[in-house]
Image (tube, rainbow, N blue to C red):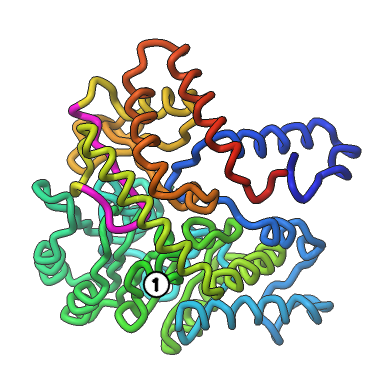
Amino acid sequence: MHQPAISQLAAADAEVAALVEGEARRQYEKIRLIASENYVSTAVLEATGTVLTNKYSEGYAGKRYYEGQQYIDLVEKLAIERAKAVFGVEHANVQPYSGSPANLAVYMALVNPGDKVMGMALPAGGHLTHGWGVSATGKWFDAVQYGVRKDTGRVDLDEVRGLALAERPKLIFCGGTAIPRTIDFAAFAEIAKEVDAVLVADIAHIAGLVAGGAHPSPVGHAQIISTTTHKTLRGPRGAMLMSTAEHAKALDKAVFPGLQGGPHNHTTAAIAVALGEAARPGFRDYAAGIVANAKALAEALVERGFDLVSGGTDNHLILIDLSNKAVAGKPAARALDRAGIELNYNSVPFDSRKPFDPSGIRLGTAAITTRGLGVEQMPRLAEWIERAISASDDAELDKVAAEVRELLSAYPMPGWV
Ligand code: DSN
């Protein structure tokens, strides 16, 4: 059952409680490979379920628009100090509701509508808010987009430099949502410096790896760092903006009052808890374990003939191009879900198929590493993936799902007893 227990909820609203229990069991029984998800600790769960949700706190510590901030100010200051210590930054804002609002605040702080900005194209692995056309950031700004090389699946920094020199954007985003390789922050910083642009590192996917020393840090290269808190960082759903002192005021003003009202204080408390966890020595082992699992899984998949974008991974994420298999991304993801393996269908660079029915699937190892799975289980996981996507009937998928459940029963899940 769900942990912490939800007995009060069950008594007050059995319908909602049953759905929460159902979701908790689902998470317990699945191999969760969605690259942007994780299992938070019970302490983080408890923090999100506190009375801090009752409080309005528009403003910042010491300068609020409501009374009664004696504890909220301390919670927010604690989260900020922990963020500064974990990432080694001069400034942190822990109020953005999530990654997209955090990125919007960066635009609001630094550019005006119509200004030129540059980011990685969504189909190449970037994020919607890095200037993709359907996003407000693509509609309201003059966005130019870089991609990856067709032959390597990796960012071509010469291409990025050429584009930056030709277009002279005011903001350059690096990072994204489907990048299996190390981001060269130093090289991006050189390019940004050459064209007098501000470099924004969106480390939402890799924040936990950066905190745990398993990916180079953007600090000292990017003036602004944007991240969600719920992916590899293993905190609640939320976000943070970090920066040099130079941009602190503008970012704070853009978050509030520019874009948001009251911060979600229960989330802020949970971010503080997660950052406390990330500061402990064990988190370095966790971050290293995520990467080791991803590399082992990538190797096992390649051995089974899977075509990985860029040929492998340096981080938590694997992008499989299924074009050489008899199945597209969406039906593969559906079959895998029935087989107890949860992931998402995803475009691959230069995809000939549409985004809602693309050629790829995206996998990440943050959640299974939290669960305690290690490199020794990765060959079996690759075997299940192959069996599921080539299964001719539901009976085979259900057989895999039963094997998955049996394996997972030996691995406790935070949030379930
Ligand atoms: N939706 C997130 C992801 O899955 O990568 C990015 O915002």
Q: Nearer the viewer, residue 157 or 296?
A: 296
Please check the rendered image and state whether residue 271 is part of the magenta-colored stretch, yes or no.
no
Numbered disc 1: secondary structure: loop
Per the rendered image, the range of residues in magenta is 312-324
Q: Is residue 245 left or right of residue 255?
A: left
Asked if residue 262 shows in the view, the reply is no
Q: In the rendered image of this protein, does residue 38 appear above or below residue 328?
A: below
Q: Assess disc 1: are there few (<14), some (14-19) or many (≥20) residues with their C-alpha within 10 Å of its C-alpha.
A: some
Residue in the picture at 21% in, 45% down: 309
Residue in the picture at 46% in, 65% down: 285
Give how far across and how far down residue 286 sits, in percent: 48, 62
* Image quadrant where residue 220 sits: bottom left
Q: Nearer the viewer, residue 361 or 167?
A: 361
Q: Is residue 411 left or right of residue 395?
A: right
Q: Nearer the viewer, residue 112 or 263?
A: 263
Indicate if the residue with disc 1 has its beta carbon within 8 Å of ligand 1: no
Q: Amino acid at mark 1?
A: Gly
Give how far across and how far down residue 326 sits, in percent: 24, 20
Number of numbered callouts drawn = 1
Residue in the picture at 48% in, 52% down: 369
* Image quadrant where residue 160 sits: bottom left
Q: Which residue is mark 1?
A: 213
